[in-house]
Image (tube, grey):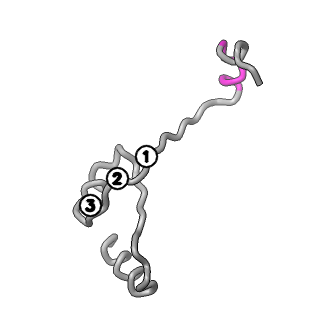
Amino acid sequence: MKAANIRERQRLNPHATGIRTQNADSNGPMLKINAALGFRPFLASTVCQANVTSVLDSPERSTARP
């Protein structure tokens, strides 16, 4: 399906010279598909999530400057 989508994108925009995709590092099967299609790592990021109250009540916050 991903290859078919890439072919359609190329048909619609034949002047495109690159394509980006995005997957979680924990999604091994999709990373394997990306590698087989020729995708290589380009950018890595980490997304963090926390409860607002926990962050505001953390000991580190009391010593941090605004």
User: Residues under labels 1 and 2: Cα distance?
Assistant: 8 Å
Residue 43: image location, x then y, percent: 43, 50
The residue tagged with tag 3: helix, strand or loop?
helix
Q: Residues within 10 Å of mark 3 (few under 14, many from 20)?
A: few
**Quadrant showing the N terminus:** bottom left
Identify the residue under disc 2: 41
Q: Residue at x 70, y 13 (%)?
A: 63
Marked residue nearer the N-terminal end (1 or 3): 3
Instruction: Give residue 25's quadrant in the image.
Output: top left
At label 2, the amino acid type is: Pro
Are the residues flagged by discs 1 and 2 in contact, CB closer than 8 Å?
yes
Q: Which mark is residue 62?
A: none
Identify the residue under disc 1: 44
In the figure, 9 relative to 64: above or below?
Answer: below
Q: Report the number of numbered marks.
A: 3
**Quadrant showing the C terminus:** top right
User: Residues under labels 1 and 3: Cα distance?
Assistant: 18 Å
Left or right position of 21 against 49:
left
Does the magenta portion include 54? yes
At label 3, the amino acid type is: Ile
Which is closer to the viewer, label 3 or label 2?
Answer: 2
Residue 38: image location, x then y, percent: 26, 64
Task: Decide whether the magenta segment is chiefly helix, strand or loop.
Answer: helix
Image: magenta residue range: 53-59
Identify the residue under disc 3: 33
The residue tagged with tag 1: helix, strand or loop?
loop
Q: Residue at x 26, y 66 (%)?
A: 37
User: Residues under labels 3 and 2: Cα distance?
Assistant: 13 Å
